[in-house]
Amino acid sequence: MTRPPGSSRHRSRRPTIAVVGLGLVGGSIARGLTRGGWVVLGVDRPAAVRAARAARAIARGFASVEAAARRAQVVFLAAPPPANRKALRALAAMDPPPPVITDVGSVKAAICADARRLGLRGFVGGHPMAGTERRGFAASSADLFRGRTWVLVHARAAAAPGRAVATLARALGARVKRMRAAEHDRTVAFVSHLPQLVSWALLQAARRDPVAARNLDVAGPGFADMTRLAGSPRGLWREIVRENRREVTRALRALRSGLAGTLPGGS
Amino acid sequence: MTRPPGSSRHRSRRPTIAVVGLGLVGGSIARGLTRGGWVVLGVDRPAAVRAARAARAIARGFASVEAAARRAQVVFLAAPPPANRKALRALAAMDPPPPVITDVGSVKAAICADARRLGLRGFVGGHPMAGTERRGFAASSADLFRGRTWVLVHARAAAAPGRAVATLARALGARVKRMRAAEHDRTVAFVSHLPQLVSWALLQAARRDPVAARNLDVAGPGFADMTRLAGSPRGLWREIVRENRREVTRALRALRSGLAGTLPGGS
């Protein structure tokens, strides 16, 4: 972001970027890197590609992961988890695979293990801790990651790909933090996945109570804050929680015991 | 608020207001009504009275509830619940008691029953659904209630005092909603008290987990939203939850059963 397009003396050394999945996160990466002067190729369904091209978020759109990856040095996997896993297998089948591959998924142990099994030495697990309850390219923004933490998970042998991804994350305004996959997954169970489940459960409890349900208009800003996440896409989240089930179960147990302690006289 | 001081033809019909407790809510009522042209008397400890006078939130300060109430037509009880109950007894012992008494507490059944037992026919239970996690006069604002709901609970016989309080609540920018005490207490258990308990429990769970605790810096805006209420004054909230224990227990049970359903495969 510090070098506007064309002004850099190192322009020729900039990798071409492929972004697979042009939703909220992928669209924001595409917008931010394009604005920063990178050439960004997008992979998604025709309607999403058209929207991204119309917004000048990508230079060119592709329907297949391989077609874009052949022309790129860095590939971001920003589709839902099952699509990312499928894309990872497609990239591993390429000869050679792209030198740097990263993802933006909320759980890291499983996809990092997949990449290892597939022999993708240039894989860097990533998780930008940003988002909104809205979704899709229409909700994307070049500034989504500004001031947020972007977690990177990679083997020591993948130091160079790690640096390449870190440079891009920082160009998007994020602070890079390196973590082990297990440590990341346990932490996000507490600070992201559990809050998500609780937000749904709070809204559901209020909506299902016949008295509270007909008086929801009295709720103040605290309730609005606590149920904002409940607007997040449920299918995607169900997938995330399933993938991180062990850690989410641990966090849920801690929450329950904490709640039992808050009510005077126990419950 | 629509009539600036001195401009109203009905100036002489405006009641003098006493506000007991010049914290976040009482201070905001005093600021807003003073700005709107009412004469507001404040009751609190000397330091709080001095701060309120310096901010021109009150015309005059008093150390005793009775001394202020003798000079006022409407008394707002905005101290913590035990102090409000004590003030209510002091007002009931006056001859005659003030014509209109209202409170701003988060639970309504108990104080409305108290007022009934004490024979205070001018009592109107009130609950402005506004607040922040901050506290004290320093956090008060004339605009705290703007756009919020102000619940009023009163007997049909108290229609005139109800109208008087409603006028003041609307002057502060709030929308007035009349409810029965039981309905109010059950609703706020779901939309206010339970979210408060959950916010604490979420923060506590994350802080007590050794891995999550050392990585709290990765948390994104969702976690910040979900734990903002955890900064609220704990002693006051413990009191509120104790007073509304039956309804909070009901809400907590609903949350638990909801949470059990969110984890794929059960838990």
Image (tube, coloured by chain):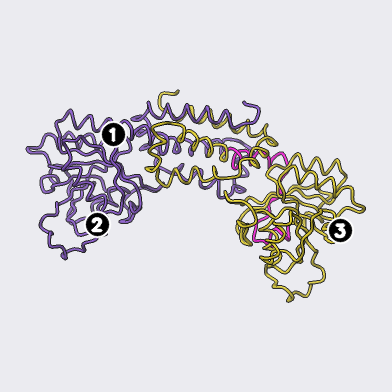
Chain colours: A purple, B yellow
Q: Is residue B193 magenta?
A: yes
Where does residue A152 sit, x and y in percent of width and height? 27, 41
Outermost residue on the right side: it is B95
Residue located 24% across and 53% down the image: A30
- Marks 3 and 2 sit apart, C-alpha to C-alpha, by 69 Å
Chain of the residue under the numbered disc 2 shown in the image: A
Name the foreground residue: A226 vs A209: A226
For disc 2, the marked residue is A57
Quadrant position of residue A266: top right
Residue located 42% across and 47% down the image: B221
Q: Is residue A209 above or below residue B220?
A: above
Asked if labels 2 and 3 touch by Cβ distance under 8 angstroms, the answer is: no
For disc 3, the marked residue is B70
Circle 1: element type? loop
The C terminus of chain A sits in image quarter: top right
Q: Are marks 1 and 3 on the same chain?
A: no
For disc 1, the marked residue is A180
Where does residue B112 sit, x and y in percent of width and height? 78, 43
In this rendering, the label closer to the viewer, 3 or 2:
3
Asked if labels 1 and 2 touch by Cβ distance under 8 angstroms, the answer is: no
Q: Is residue B260 above or below residue B45?
A: above
Chain of the residue under the numbered disc 3 shown in the image: B
